[in-house]
């Protein structure tokens, strides 16, 4: 039988109220008495169920989620997952405040983190821009004792408690393998379309993709990275320009968003001249493009899993509990026209 609070009180020769004060680190207990209670806890092997204690006290975990605001379909999916979590707030004993920031704006993101810290939430989750301003704001949050989780894109260094997202280097290597295998030894150039190299997930995908192409597919040559800012109009213009100037592009890796522009650019080409295309995130746009043959494969991450993971981790960190790493691992799904759900 597991030892109880009453067992601790009997073993230490103190009242239940004193044990409660020690367990909750409240004042009003002499050092010698605290030592007796701590000794009893150790001797009996007592492990406190923090979740049950918080449930009994009716604790509500207040979390702040800071998300880029644009028409990026994946970010809209992330917002929908946050809304689902908000709908379960009473059951999960959480409250979520959603803060909008412009995409790829390090100054705005760092200001939003600082403002959230001033409000002392139980935890903060944010889509990171890997910039000095954001790192400094994260450091201030850590100094204030507020748990931090990065979503989708990570922050260089250890200035956060957890990263809820896929292994982006693995995603880049997977994209290279798919394009190389689809092309089957053809000679030509591959265009790489990123949102912004300011975010770590895009840099990691790009670097791993380039390394895998160079090592495994020597008949393919990479073109300079195009930065579309995850904006469909910009993506369509950049691709239209490079495709009009070159007729040797045999592959495209779209590692960010803005895929409505990518689909329009592919639709404007004769089917027999279209390059092999691998993109990220299964959205209404990429699903339709897969079905029409405008995109050949999509690498997907589950936004709902990422949000649920962030909430679990922030709760655990707020309670000083450990995280189950295997439960929080976000997988990479590969979708073709043939296996669309």
Image (cartoon, rainbow, N blue to C red):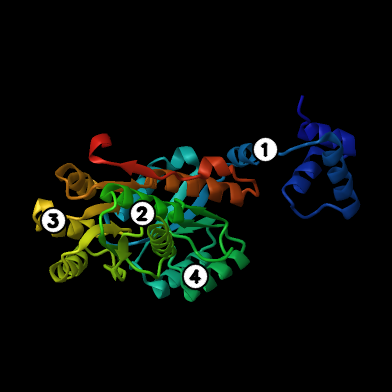
Residue shown at 41%/66% (left/top)? 199
The residue sitting at 41% across, 57% down in the picture is: 212
Residue 266: x and y in percent read 15, 56
Say which of marks 4 and 2 sits in front: 2
> Dot 1, how many residues are within 10 Å of its Cα: few (below 14), some (14-19), or many (20+)?
few
Asked if 159 appears above or below 26 in the picture, the reply is below
Tell which circle, 3 or 1, labels the residue nearer the N-terminal end.
Answer: 1
Q: Quadrant of residue 241?
A: bottom left
Mark nearer the viewer, 4 or 3? 3
Which tag, 1 or 2, sits closer to the chain's start? 1
The quarter of the rendered structure image containing the C terminus is: top left
Q: Is there any visible trace of residue 194 in the rendered image?
A: no
In this view, the residue in front, 291 or 269, is 269
Q: Residues within 10 Å of mark 2 (few under 14, many from 20)?
A: many
What is the crowding at mark 3: few (fewer than 14 residues within 10 Å), some, or many (at least 20)?
few
Work out how far the residue at label 4 is from the one at label 2, CA to CA, in angstroms. 39 Å
Residue 79, image x and y in percent? 34, 52
- Snapshot quadrant of residue 126: bottom left
In terms of image quadrants, where is residue 3? top right
Please tell me whether mark 1 or mark 2 is closer to you in this view: 2
Of the two numbered discs 3 and 1 in the rendering, the one whose residue sits closer to the viewer: 3
Q: Earlier in the sequence, mark 4 or mark 2?
A: 4
- Decide: is 31 above or below 101: above
- Name the residue beneath numbered marker 3: 273
Label placed on residue 49: 1
The disc, 2 or 3, on the residue closer to the chain's N-terminal end is 2
Instruction: Name the residue tied to disc 2.
Output: 176
Instruction: Determine whether, in the image, residue 56 is placed left or right of residue 220.
Output: right
Q: From what the image shows, is residue 235 above or below residue 280?
A: below
Secondary structure found at label 4:
helix
């Amino acid at each position: 039988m597991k030892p109880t609070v009453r067992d601790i009180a009997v073993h230490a020769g103190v009242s239940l109220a004193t044990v409660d004060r020690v367990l909750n680190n409240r004042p009003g207990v002499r050092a010698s008495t605290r030592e007796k209670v701590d000794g009893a806890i150790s001797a009996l092997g007592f492990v406190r169920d923090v979740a049950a204690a918080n449930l009994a006290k009716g604790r509500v975990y207040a979390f702040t989620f800071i998300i880029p605001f644009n028409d990026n379909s994946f970010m809209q999916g992330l917002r929908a997952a946050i809304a689902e979590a908000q709908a379960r707030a009473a059951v999960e004993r959480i409250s979520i405040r959603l803060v909008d920031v412009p995409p790829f704006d390090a100054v705005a993101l760092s200001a939003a983190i600082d403002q959230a810290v001033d409000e002392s939430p139980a935890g903060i989750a944010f889509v990171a821009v890997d910039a000095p301003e954001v790192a400094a704001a994260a450091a201030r949050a850590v100094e204030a004792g507020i748990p931090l989780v990065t979503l989708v894109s990570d922050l260089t260094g250890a200035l956060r408690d957890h990263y809820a997202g896929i292994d982006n280097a693995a995603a880049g290597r997977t994209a290279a393998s798919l394009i190389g295998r689809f092309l089957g030894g053809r000679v030509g150039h591959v265009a790489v379309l990123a949102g912004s190299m300011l975010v770590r997930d895009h840099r990691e995908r790009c670097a791993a993709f380039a390394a895998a192409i160079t090592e495994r597919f020597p008949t393919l040559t990479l073109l300079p990275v195009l930065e579309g800012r995850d904006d469909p109009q910009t993506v369509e213009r950049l691709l239209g320009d490079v495709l009009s100037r070159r007729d040797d592009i045999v592959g495209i890796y779209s590692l960010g968003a803005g895929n409505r522009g990518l689909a329009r650019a592919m639709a404007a080409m004769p089917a027999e001249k279209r390059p092999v295309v691998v993109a990220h995130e299964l959205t209404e746009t990429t699903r339709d493009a897969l079905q029409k043959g405008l995109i050949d494969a999509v690498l997907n991450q589950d936004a709902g899993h990422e949000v649920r993971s962030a909430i679990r981790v922030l709760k655990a960190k707020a309670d000083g509990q450990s995280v189950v790493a295997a439960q929080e691992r976000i997988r990479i799904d590969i979708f073709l026209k043939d296996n669309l759900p």
